[in-house]
Amino acid sequence: MDQCLQRQLRRLATLVLLGAATTAEVGAKEGSPGLASRLVDAAKAEVAARIPVPKGGTLSIALAPPDPRLSLAPCPGKLATKMLQAPAHGGAISVQVSCPGPTRWSLYLSGTASVRAPVATARVGLARGALVAADDLEMRMAELSTLAGGFALAKAELIGRRLRQPVAKGNPITPRATAPDLWVKTGEPIVLTAGQGALAVRMEGISLSDGAENALVSVRNAVSRKILKGRVIAPGLVQLGP
């Protein structure tokens, strides 16, 4: 295939992609740099509206400008935008920008969005099984799209939970790397309570399963030996009944 025919096919493919009704040069009132700026600004506004930024965070958007060789008819009306990729925490993005007016065309701008926000990290090295306390944590800025394992945007998400794995100093602590602290453990003696207020009765029991706060567990009454169900309401305390 000769070079002339190749150039014609590439130009035809460009026109099909743009959906352009015309290839007229941009008029003097709206020169190419001005249109390019409008396209990028419109696309950035769409990205900013679609990607949430946590409190104290920032959003940076980098978009490749349209090919300067493209010839687009002026668009007198407002440009329409549609984000095709909207990663919740940043990453690769693609935005369709269209002119809905009488001179219809559309194109795609691609780039990246970077969301940086404070996340909970280990202030000191923490061992597996450690109960996370407020003093163990500090908030540090991080790029969220790089934290594939997840992250905590507030210390309160982690305080009082136990680590499933060790965490090195300065590393983010993910919620799934922790588990609720167990208030009752299998085989340990516990207190069973039934009834409310002045009619409440307490008795000794044995937990038959592990349970965190508000967990439903099986227990055995130490006197009657009956196996019952109850809800964990405090460390070592299980409320019997539904």
Image (tube, rainbow, N blue to C red):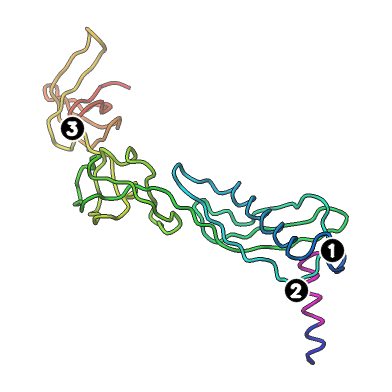
Q: Earlier in the sequence, mark 2 or mark 1?
A: 1
Report the span colored magenta: 8-19
Residue at the image position 84 percent from the left and 63 percent from the top: 28
Where 93 sits versus 201, above or below?
below
Q: Does the magenta stretch mainly form a helix, a strand or a loop?
A: helix
Residue at the image position 18 percent from the left and 13 percent from the top: 201
Who is closer to the viewer here, 119 or 235?
A: 119
Residue 138 in percent (x, y) is at 29, 46
Residue at the image position 25 percent from the left and 28 percent from the top: 232
Q: Are marks 3 and 1 in contact (CB under 8 Å)?
A: no
Between the residue at mark 3 and the residue at mark 2, the CA separation in whole angstroms equals: 74 Å
Between the residue at mark 2 and the residue at mark 1, the CA separation in whole angstroms equals: 16 Å
Residue 125 in percent (x, y) is at 20, 53
Specify the label residue 220 is tagged with.
Answer: none
- Looking at the rendered structure, the kind of residue marked 2 is Arg
Give the residue number, with chain letter if any, for mark 2: 69
Q: Earlier in the sequence, mark 3 or mark 1?
A: 1
Mark 3 crowd level (few <14, some 14–19, many ≥20, 10 Å Cα): many
Give the residue number, with chain letter if any, for mark 1: 28
